Image (cartoon, rainbow, N blue to C red):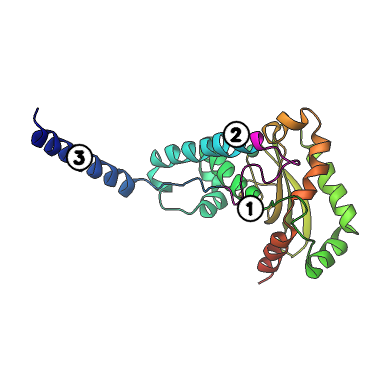
């Protein structure tokens, strides 16, 4: 094969690939994994770099990939936002429920954290609501810790605002969350912590309580306060 023929063949191959890629994009909704909003080692020593790499690059990536596969096989769901999908998750099977929840929960989780000591404090408005509904910030933290420890197996613990504007601590199994129509207590999440063992096992092994206690150091209260303000509009 001479050089000209090779170039022409390559161009034809690229054109074929281009067409094929366009066809895929046109027909399937595709969720994507965003990069973390900080480097993998930013949360150390509270959460180590290796845990963050595996958690984001392997676990979260797998939720995104499996969600995309499931959506491609269920054309009725194509074009729905993730939030719309979760609000009517009872109509979907377990694959969409687990992976759609997994994608939303982890995206929310990464955004809820920042470098140790950089997260500020709850806004005056949020602190007033926490004090009103839990007694104090420490009592809220104690309720959150108890819910995290009380979740048997894998799941999440959340701070939510319910439909009446009341703050509540709730826990969900697996990758469920309070946005799902199947959740026993629904509401707008302000903060969520992942209590699956994959979130902490490399560094904390079986000591979930130590992980839950240390985690407050990386909570981004500035962002949580903005979420609370947005929930009241
Ligand atoms: Mn996780």
Extent of the magenta region = 36-51
Residue indicated by mark 1: 111
| Vertical position of residue 190 compared to residue 211: above or below | below
Quadrant of the snapshot with the N terminus: top left
**Secondary structure category for the residue under label 2:** helix
Residue 93 seen: no
Evaluate if marks 1 and 2 touch, with contact meaning CB atoms under 8 Å apart. no
Q: Is mark 2 within 8 Å of ligand 1?
A: no
Residue 91 seen: yes
Task: Give the mark nearer the N terminus: 1 vs 3.
Answer: 3
Task: Give the mark nearer the N terminus: 3 vs 2.
Answer: 3
**Secondary structure category for the residue under label 3:** helix
Task: Measure how far apart labels 1 and 3 are at the Cα level.
Answer: 39 Å
**Residue 147, quarter of the rendered image:** top right
Residue indicated by mark 2: 54
**Count of number-bearing discs:** 3
Quadrant of the snapshot with the C terminus: bottom right
> Alpha-carbon neighbours of circle 2 within 10 Å: few (<14), some, or many (≥20)?
some
Q: Which mark is residue 96?
A: none
Task: Give the mark nearer the N terminus: 1 vs 2.
Answer: 2
**Residue at (87% x, 48% y) in the render:** 142
> Alpha-carbon neighbours of circle 1 within 10 Å: few (<14), some, or many (≥20)?
some
- Where residue 167 appears, as percent x and y from the top left, is 78, 59
**Residue at (70% x, 45% y) in the render:** 43
Residue indicated by mark 3: 16
């Amino acid at each position: 094969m001479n050089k000209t023929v090779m170039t022409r063949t390559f161009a034809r191959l690229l054109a074929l690939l281009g067409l094929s890629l366009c066809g895929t994009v046109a027909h399937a909704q595709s969720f994507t994994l965003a990069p973390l909003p900080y480097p993998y080692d930013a949360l150390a020593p509270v959460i180590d770099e290796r845990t963050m790499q595996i958690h984001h690059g392997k676990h979260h990536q797998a939720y995104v990939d499996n969600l995309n596969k499931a959506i491609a096989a269920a054309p009725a769901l194509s074009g729905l936002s993730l939030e719309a999908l979760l609000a009517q998750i009872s109509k979907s099977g377990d694959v969409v429920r687990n992976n759609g929840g997994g994608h939303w929960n982890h995206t929310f989780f990464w955004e809820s954290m920042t470098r140790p000591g950089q997260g500020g404090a709850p806004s005056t408005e949020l602190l007033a609501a926490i004090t009103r509904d839990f007694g104090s910030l420490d009592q809220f933290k104690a309720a959150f810790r108890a819910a995290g420890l009380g979740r048997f197996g894998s799941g999440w613990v959340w701070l939510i605002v319910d439909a009446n504007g009341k703050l509540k601590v709730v826990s969900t199994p697996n990758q469920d969350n309070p946005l799902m129509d199947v959740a026993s207590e629904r509401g707008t999440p302000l903060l969520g912590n992942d209590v699956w063992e994959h979130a902490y096992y490399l560094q904390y092994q079986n000591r979930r309580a130590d992980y839950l206690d240390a985690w407050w150091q990386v909570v981004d209260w500035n962002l949580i306060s903005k979420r609370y303000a947005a929930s009241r509009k």
